[in-house]
Image (cartoon, rainbow, N blue to C red):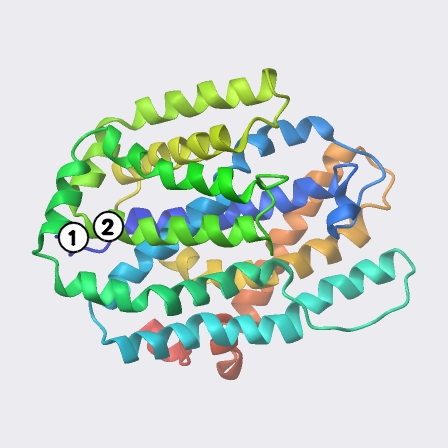
Amino acid sequence: MITERRHDIDWLRVIAIGLLLIYHIAIIFQPWAMFIGFIRSNESLENLWIPMTMLNVWRIPLLFYVSGMGLYFALRKRTWKQLLVERSKRILLPFVFGVIAITPLHFLIFQEYYNMPLSYYPHLGHLWFLGNIFVYVLLLLPLFFFLKKKEDGRFRKGLSSLMKHPIGPLSITVFFILEAVIVKPQIFEMYAQTSHGFFLGFIAFFFGFLLVYSGKEFWQTVLKWKWLYMGIAVVLYSIRLFVFETTPPGYLMAIESNCWIFGVFGLSYKYLNRPSALLSYLSQAAYPVYIIHMFALYFGSIIILPLDIHPILKFVLVTAFTIVVCYVIYEFIIKRIGFLRPLFGLKWSFRKTLN
């Protein structure tokens, strides 16, 4: 069984949130940005969306996978009561606080930018992800603790045996295909506050737990066959881009999504499973940055978009502004003010974190 700290999983969480930030900035430069509540640049960078279409089928499912994996490691050391308390502090509290105090901020900026009447109302915004995760924890915790007690049972042994073969990880894609066929999402990549996003996230979270639960066999398989999975993903993405103009049937998107993810798991297991001071810092910062990044992004947009400069330079400046503002808010406010720390998913004591 897996007992060591998995630094590659920590890195994947950090990388996924970093990609999310870039993805959201890219939306601002698309002509349809306002339709999903983003400030829109008057000058579009539609070519920028080509690499984003590669990311958008696997970046959010990856986060759900990683969250399920994280729960496996968390429950090894805790009773179900301890785990519920810990997840309530780390997920539910920041979610409720964010819905009330953080997500309304960037919509107020949106209203101001477009000279709309200013109005405050709590809403999920980009924090829908945290709400989903907490619901998944509540729904799956009894099953996960049951499986924990049966780690030497037939189910785990059979799962480990299945994961020894390259087809093993791919076999779980059947459930994602069924979700796409049954739910029939109008836009596969639209996860936020949709039934598709909820059920796809549930499946990814569940299997994220099971893949780690299965033991090292899964990791050895994705390590060995990573280029096979990446190759299949590239082929399916090329078909999506050139044959279907980025809108193929949902079942193809589901297969492509998991192939990207299994390839990424293999690459990260090979190259990222080692500790570093940078990882320690970023893994702490990632959660608060995820919560505040939309405010920083919108704030930077209202300053930079009106400038008379090339749109590519605007994209670079908005990206730099968002990163710097998130860093400053995290490093000098959230991290150092005791009562704010738990509201952003951090441990109560800054001093204890340093020790």
Mark 1 and mark 2: Cα distance apart in space: 8 Å
Looking at the image, residue 279 sits to the left or right of residue 121; the answer is: left
Is residue 195 or residue 326 the one in the foreground? 195
Image location (x, y in percent) of residue 130: 50, 63
At 68% from the left edge and 61% from the top edge, which residue is drawn?
Answer: 295
Indicate the quadrant where residue 4 lies.
Answer: bottom left
Question: Which residue lies under the disc numbered 2?
Answer: 212
Give the residue type that dot 1 points to. Ile
Q: Residues within 10 Å of mark 2 (few under 14, many from 20)?
A: many
The amino acid type, in three-letter code, at marker 2 is Val
Q: In this orientation, which residue lies closer to the viewer: 228 or 288?
A: 228
Relative to 72, residue 310 above or below: above
**Closer to the camera: disc 1 or disc 2?**
2
Residue named by callout 1: 2
State whether residue 181 is above or below residue 237: below
Q: Residue at x 80, y 58 (%)?
A: 110
Crowding at mark 1 (Cα within 10 Å: few <14, some 14-19, many 20+) = few
Figure check: 38 above or below 343 = above
Front-most of residues 197 and 331: 197
Q: Residue at x 59, y 42 (%)?
A: 185
Instruction: Examine the image and state in which quarter residue 235 appears.
Output: top left
Instruction: Identify the secondary structure beneath mark 1.
Output: loop
Mark 1 or mark 2, earlier in chain: 1
Disc 1 vs disc 2: Cβ atoms closer than 8 Å? yes
On residue 163, the disc is none
Q: Quadrant of the C terminus?
A: bottom left
Q: Residue furthest bottom?
A: 339
Name the residue at 25% across, 61% down.
73
